[in-house]
Image (tube, rainbow, N blue to C red):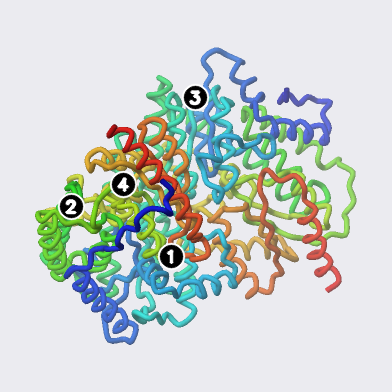
């Protein structure tokens, strides 16, 4: 049956209380950024999303600013391209990460966005957690802004057992102690250890709830889409982790998702395919991309992207009894980007098996080579060694010029058509 | 088959010719020749850049640079593993493995230089399970003394892994002997670079490239002899200065530019006074100290006396500051940024360099290249135009 002749599946997706709550809270977060930009708020600390020590920053009442989140918001709001072009005018290459270009373009355009005015950094805290582009991005921001930078160097997961060495752990803890000194100097306050413990406790509880939410997608049907709906939950996980607000959000989200699971409700009228997806989404065309899968009744039951900022679902918990050490462990091991490529293969394999997926979709984005470089080998592994049907498609996470809708749709259609055929044969 | 033997009848031209053959030989005959010299000899491949070759050499093994295949190998398998937007050196290095050309190696070393290189290390682990694969994480916190301490521990970890793999102890004396040997080689390379910077008509950039490249593929003891002969012969070389502009070149620290491209730049009217070719193999701006803790000496040398590059992020100083300083010290008329296609670190740097060079009023030109290129007409005409614009300014 040709894909075009299919009955179109009603486009539904989950739009519940959680979405409004998220909008509200992230709106307030961005208001705090604007206030800081106008000199009415705390000190702004630029950080990266993956494995960061936001708990320390919260303990000093400093405001975390995430250039990645700002860049993706610009893409979602279709504001990125002129900024990317402005950065390319400055000398950035078409082959450079478009997050960086959109951010640099925005920086030189006065840091004004439709969602906030982004403050100048008081501290550029480069948590180098695998992504080498982070180092260059923040090196550039430091040079443009003239503001102080601290490169918080996290040794990559490179040992045979996949664990950091004792030396690695010590090295990160000692650096975190230096960061504390920097924050103390900057704010004129000394670290309130009890407060830090409370914040780490909040992160621990938030992480627990987030893992429980993610386990719900093992149900059939999956109560939400673990890619397209998870991104709604990722914003509070990153921007509000370690706050009472953040924890409140995850309590509400869990309640709502659990109720949906109990009622056997999914994001689509009928769940026909369950897939695991690897790679960041195409932010400028999220809606169109989602529809490509929805029309086939395909739901993402797990995604690697939702573990960029932290992996809590396989047993990690921030520990208030050892706050600094647990922040260090989170940065070293319990986030996607500081794990090696083969650990990612294993993570995807676990998802496919434990979440009962029919297929793997690899969304390869040009901007992020941390994710994408070598995904052809990943495809080889899943198709040839594990016999998991795998689709590899390419576009970008930020730059709308790399999203070729018709071509992507054809690939997705052809893939699910053959998957449907395969399922039919199995049933016969 | 390329041979590394250089005897007393050698001339500079014959040495450069030998080096060219060794550099192009993707069967790695020079290294295999060393390997066959005695039973049980092991060879390790080192991907770019800043490979701690002393550790490998101190273990009695031979470190060689396995850094792509230039235009000597058609990529038939690796491009289904790495996408079109990934640089060529990553793909051609994998292709060397997938076509069984690296079977003679005991293992490979990769380093925390960029995202594709790091993922390549994992792809090697999966595709070549019999190989010893080491991934070195270099500290990027150089402003704190913690970075040095960390790196010493990292080197200790690697030494331990090598000892286990090879079943032998690596002693302080072993390490210091290797450091001393590589100090000598790097010292001579620095001298040759110095001669080139001061009298660029005596020896060209393509020639020093050949000399350095060959050294990454042969026994260092042989390379040392070769460099000593070059030092003897160089002052006697007949040569006359030409009317060329003086440039320094930056951006080619990883993927290797084709030698004919460098020759094209020179023929188009440039004296290339300094460059960043093999910066991670030439490594240090001065000798690594010989001391009772050689790993501490190496770690300290990475932090405080290694050449800057696009993949070393030292918040104590700016990279563009380094480049401007190099251009000024060399009294260069201009800077050429020669970045490999898809090389994110070098292309990112360009955005900073461009602004800094403009601010310092230093003319500059951006060229992109791929290791597999073999026609350079476009580069030639761009450089000729650039040279003319400076000469007749």
Q: Nearer the viewer, mark 3 or mark 4?
A: 4
Q: Earlier in the sequence, mark 4 or mark 2?
A: 2
Say few, some or many: other residues with alpha carbon within 10 Å of mark 1 (under 14 / 14 to 19 / 20 or more).
Answer: many
- Residue that numbered label 2 is attached to: A211
x, y percent for residue B390: 80, 69
Q: Nearer the viewer, mark 1 or mark 4?
A: 4
The answer for how far apart the CA atoms under marks 3 and 4 are is: 40 Å
Q: Is residue A300 above or below residue A80?
A: above
Q: Earlier in the sequence, mark 1 or mark 4?
A: 1
- Is label 2 in a helix, a strand or a loop? helix
- Residue that numbered label 3 is attached to: B106
Residue A335 in sight here: no
Asked if badge 1 and badge 3 are on a common chain, one would say: no
Residue under mark 1: which chain is it in? A
Residue under mark 3: which chain is it in? B
Residue under mark 4: which chain is it in? A
Q: Nearer the viewer, mark 4 or mark 2?
A: 4
Question: Would residue B329 appear left or right of B244 to someone viewing this image?
Answer: left
- Is label 4 in a helix, a strand or a loop? strand
Q: Are marks 1 and 4 in contact (CB under 8 Å)?
A: no
Asked if badge 1 and badge 4 are on a common chain, one would say: yes
Q: Nearer the viewer, mark 2 or mark 1?
A: 2
For the point 75% across and 66% down, which residue is it? Answer: B333
x, y percent for residue B39: 54, 12
- Is label 3 in a helix, a strand or a loop? loop
The answer for how far apart the CA atoms under marks 4 and 2 are is: 19 Å
Residue A275, disc: 4
């Amino acid at each position: 049956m040709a894909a075009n002749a299919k009955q179109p599946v009603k486009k539904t997706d989950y739009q519940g209380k959680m979405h409004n709550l998220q909008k509200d809270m992230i709106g307030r977060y961005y208001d705090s950024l604007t206030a800081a930009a106008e000199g009415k708020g705390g000190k702004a600390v630029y950080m990266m999303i993956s494995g960061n020590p936001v708990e320390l920053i919260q303990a000093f009442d400093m405001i975390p600013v995430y250039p990645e989140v700002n860049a993706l918001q610009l893409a979602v709001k279709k504001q990125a391209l002129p900024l990317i072009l402005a950065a390319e005018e400055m000398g950035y290459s078409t082959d450079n990460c478009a997050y960086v270009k959109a951010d640099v373009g925005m920086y030189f355009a006065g840091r004004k966005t439709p969602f906030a005015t982004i403050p100048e950094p008081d501290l550029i805290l480069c948590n180098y957690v695998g992504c080498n582009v982070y180092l260059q991005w923040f090196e550039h921001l430091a040079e443009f802004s003239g503001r102080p930078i601290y490169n918080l160097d996290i040794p990559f997961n490179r040992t045979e057992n996949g664990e950091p060495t004792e030396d690695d752990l010590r090295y990160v803890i000692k650096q975190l102690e230096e960061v504390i000194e920097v924050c103390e100097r900057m704010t004129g306050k000394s670290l309130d250890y009890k407060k830090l413990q409370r914040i780490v406790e909040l992160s621990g509880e938030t992480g627990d709830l987030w893992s429980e939410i993610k386990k719900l997608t093992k149900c059939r049907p999956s109560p939400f889409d673990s890619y397209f709906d998870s991104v709604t939950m990722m914003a509070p996980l990153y921007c509000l982790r370690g706050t009472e607000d953040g924890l409140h959000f995850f309590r509400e989200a869990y309640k709502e998702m659990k109720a949906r699971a109990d009622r056997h409700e999914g994001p689509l009228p009928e769940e026909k395919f369950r897939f695991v997806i690897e790679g960041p989404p195409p932010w400028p065309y999220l809606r169109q991309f989602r529809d490509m899968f929805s029309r086939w009744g395909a739901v993402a039951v797990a995604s690697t992207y939702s573990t960029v900022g932290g992996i809590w679902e396989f047993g990690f918990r921030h520990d208030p009894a050892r706050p600094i050490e647990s922040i260090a462990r989170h940065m070293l091991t319990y986030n996607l980007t500081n794990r090696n490529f083969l650990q990612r293969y294993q993570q995807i394999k676990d998802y496919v098996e434990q979440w009962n997926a029919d297929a793997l979709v690899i969304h390869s984005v040009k901007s992020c080579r941390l994710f994408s470089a070598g995904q052809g080998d990943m495809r080889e592994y899943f198709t040839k060694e594990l016999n998991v049907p795998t689709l590899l498609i390419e576009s970008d996470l930020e730059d709308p010029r790399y999203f070729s809708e018709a071509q992507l749709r054809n690939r997705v259609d052809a893939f699910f058509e053959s998957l449907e055929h395969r399922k039919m044969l199995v049933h016969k | 088959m390329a041979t590394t033997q250089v005897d007393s009848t050698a001339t500079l031209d014959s040495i450069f010719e030998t080096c060219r053959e060794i550099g192009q030989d993707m069967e790695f005959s020079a290294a295999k020749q060393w390997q066959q010299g005695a039973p049980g000899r092991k060879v390790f491949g080192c991907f770019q850049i800043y490979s701690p070759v002393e550790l490998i050499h101190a273990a009695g093994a031979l470190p060689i640079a396995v850094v792509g295949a230039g235009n000597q190998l058609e990529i038939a398998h690796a491009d289904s593993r790495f996408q079109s937007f990934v640089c060529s050196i990553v793909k051609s290095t994998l292709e060397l493995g997938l076509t069984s050309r690296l079977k003679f190696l005991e293992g490979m070393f990769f380093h925390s230089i960029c995202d594709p290189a790091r993922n390549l290390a994992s792809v090697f682990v999966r595709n070549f399970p019999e190989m010893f694969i080491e991934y070195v994480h270099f500290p990027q916190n150089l402003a704190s003394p913690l970075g040095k301490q960390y790196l010493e521990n990292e080197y200790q970890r690697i030494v331990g892994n090598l000892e286990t793999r090879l079943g032998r102890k690596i002693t302080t004396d072993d390490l210091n002997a290797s450091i001393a040997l590589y100090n000598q080689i790097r010292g001579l390379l620095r001298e040759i670079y110095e001669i080139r910077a001061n009298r660029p008509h005596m020896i060209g950039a393509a020639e020093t490239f050949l000399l350095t490249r060959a050294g990454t593929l042969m026994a260092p003891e042989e390379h040392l002899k070769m460099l000593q002969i070059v030092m003897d012969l160089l002052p006697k070389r007949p040569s006359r200065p030409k009317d060329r502009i003086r440039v320094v070149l930056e951006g080619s620290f990883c993927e290797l530019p084709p030698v004919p491209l460098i020759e094209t730049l020179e023929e188009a009217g440039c004296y290339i006074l300094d460059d960043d070719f093999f910066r991670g193999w030439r490594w240090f701006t001065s000798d690594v100290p010989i001391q009772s803790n050689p790993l501490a000496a190496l770690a300290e040398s990475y932090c405080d006396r290694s050449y800057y590059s696009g993949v070393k992020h030292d918040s104590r100083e700016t990279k563009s500051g380094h480049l401007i300083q190099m251009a000024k010290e060399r009294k260069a008329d201009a800077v050429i940024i020669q970045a490999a296609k898809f090389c994110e670190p070098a292309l990112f740097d360009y955005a900073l360099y461009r602004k800094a060079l403009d601010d310092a009023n230093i003319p500059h030109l951006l060229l992109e290249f791929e290791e597999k290129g073999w026609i350079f007409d476009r580069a030639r005409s761009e450089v000729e135009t650039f040279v003319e614009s400076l000469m007749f300014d």
